[in-house]
Amino acid sequence: MNRDEPVPVYRYQIMVPFRFVYRFNVSHPVPNTTGPEWYRYNPFQCPALDNTKDIPLSYALFNDKGTNSAGYQNLFDALLDSMYFATEKLGGQNIEIIVSESGWPSEGHPAATLENAQTYYTNLINHVKGGVGTPKKPGRTIETYLFVMFDENQKDGQSSEQHFGLFYPDQRPKYQLNFN
């Protein structure tokens, strides 16, 4: 996969569980709830980021100039639109998607630096608040939640998993972000 190709969301491994979850949610709605679907998205966890030849870091950090041949300027929009295409393919044309978490670690991987994390969060905030939307859903504010408030220094897994926080465990901020 490279940045000039659409994101391959219809792979069997992805679509089978997604189809089950989507159909279960549609056929078993929570009573008195007509809310949107929630989507967890962390571009850093995309395996392609280990191959910056195919997906440049600038594309993941919202720093690309211009669009690729599929009409995308950043990985966030491409992955979010892939979820819209997948829900439509399964019959959910009017499903609104909320990004329930998105973030970038500050340590634990060559691309996980304080500078890259601050760049990602700053550009993500500006992008979702800007009302530009995505190529598939233009002119929209994208409801998005940042992952996560504090580093989780006791969390198991890869080292980078412990360093997604906007603050260190002792509550010191890692960098300044503007939410206005």
Image: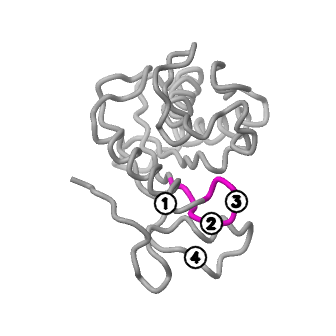
Tell me the element at label 4. Answer: loop
Q: Nearer the viewer, residue 123 or 32?
A: 123
Check disc 3 and give the amino acid type.
Answer: His
Q: Are marks 3 and 1 in contact (CB under 8 Å)?
A: no
Q: CA distance from mark 2 to mark 4?
A: 12 Å
Report crowding for label 4: few under 14, some 14 to 19, many 20 or more residues within 10 A (C-alpha). some
Q: Which residue is mark 2?
A: 107
Q: Is residue 174 left or right of residue 3?
A: left
Q: Residue 147 got which mark? A: 1
Name the residue rendered at 70%, 32% in the picture. 15
Q: Are marks 3 and 2 in contact (CB under 8 Å)?
A: yes
Check disc 1 and give the amino acid type.
Answer: Phe
Read off the magenta span. Answer: 103-112
Q: CA distance from mark 3 to mark 1?
A: 17 Å
Name the residue rendered at 59%, 24% in the picture. 90
Q: CA distance from mark 1 to mark 2?
A: 15 Å
Q: Which residue is mark 3?
A: 109
Q: Position of residue 176 (x, y in %)?
A: 34, 64
N-terminal label among 3 and 1: 3
| 120 is within the stretch colored magenta | no
N-terminal label among 4 and 1: 1
Could you say which quadrant of the image residue 94 lies in? top left
Q: Are marks 4 and 1 in contact (CB under 8 Å)?
A: no
Check disc 2 and give the amino acid type.
Answer: Glu
Q: Position of residue 113 (x, y in %)?
A: 58, 60
Q: Residue 152 got which mark? A: 4
